[in-house]
Amino acid sequence: PHVAPELTLNSYFRTNGYYVAGAGKIYHGGGGRRSEWDDYAGGVGGDPRPSGANTGVGGIKFAPLDSRDEDMLDYKSVSWIIDQLGRKHDKPWFLACGLHKPHMPWNVPRKYYDLYPPETIELPPVLETDLDDLPPEGVRMAKAMGDHEAILKSGRWKEAVQGYLAAITFADAQVGRLLDALDKSPHATNTIVCFW
């Protein structure tokens, strides 16, 4: 369902005299809703694509990228927000920075994959009866006969976990960049950070 503009957090702040700016994945699949912002990063592009055809198994997409952090959309979104921190504002401000990762595809620079060699990954124990206590809708959502079964049959479960861990670590590095920039800014002692 569509959330009315007056109900969004940024609109609330804007209505109450704040300058509001955003970048990245703020609304899942809902676009930027740019009319609800004073400024919104646009045209920062997408992520590089992996080379070759080995990009995952079924709906589980993962592959290391031979690219730099700077080539990634999330990096560009964080950089845009960091630039906002350096600007002079004549009224209170609200900044929102949305990261796409670790959402799939788990395609991030190879250096993050290298932190998690597949031979060091310990897979979780899974009971054959693991889904028996779920309602039918839960079983359907788990796709027991879909993506997970395909991963098991492919023998690439550890590679998929490696991709997920790499994407989490990449996202963590971007959050770190943003927090480091805030700490170095004149706003370090009078800014509230909400992370979710």
Image (cartoon, helix red, strand yellow):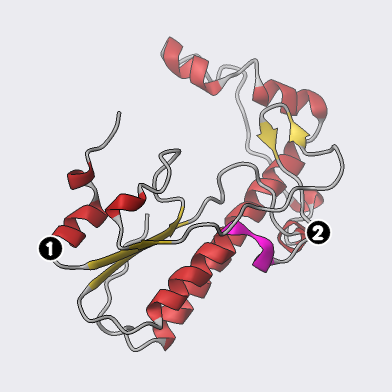
Task: Give the number of the disc on residue 90.
Answer: none
Name the magenta segment's main secondary structure.
Answer: helix
- Does 158 appear in magenta? no
Relative horizontal placement of residue 12, taking residue 75 as reference (left or right): left
Mark 1: secondary structure = loop
- Does residue 5 appear anywhere in the picture? yes
Q: Which residue is mark 2?
A: 66
Indicate the quadrant containing the C terminus: top left, top right, bottom left or bottom right.
bottom left
Mark 2: secondary structure = loop
Front residue of this view, candidates 187 and 12: 12
Relative horizontal placement of residue 108, taking residue 187 as reference (left or right): right
Task: Give the number of the disc on residue 16.
Answer: 1
Tell me which segment is drawn in magenta.
Answer: 69-73
Q: Residue at x 50, y 67 (%)?
A: 78
- In x, y percent, where is residue 24? 47, 55
Q: Residue at x 26, y 37 (%)?
A: 3
Report the residue that reaches farthest toward the left: 16
Which label sits in the foreground, 1 or 2?
A: 1
- In x, y percent, where is residue 169? 61, 60
Indicate the quadrant containing the N terminus: top left, top right, bottom left or bottom right.
top left
- In x, y percent, where is residue 135? 41, 13
Report the residue that reaches farthest toward the right: 52
- Does residue 169 appear anywhere in the picture? no
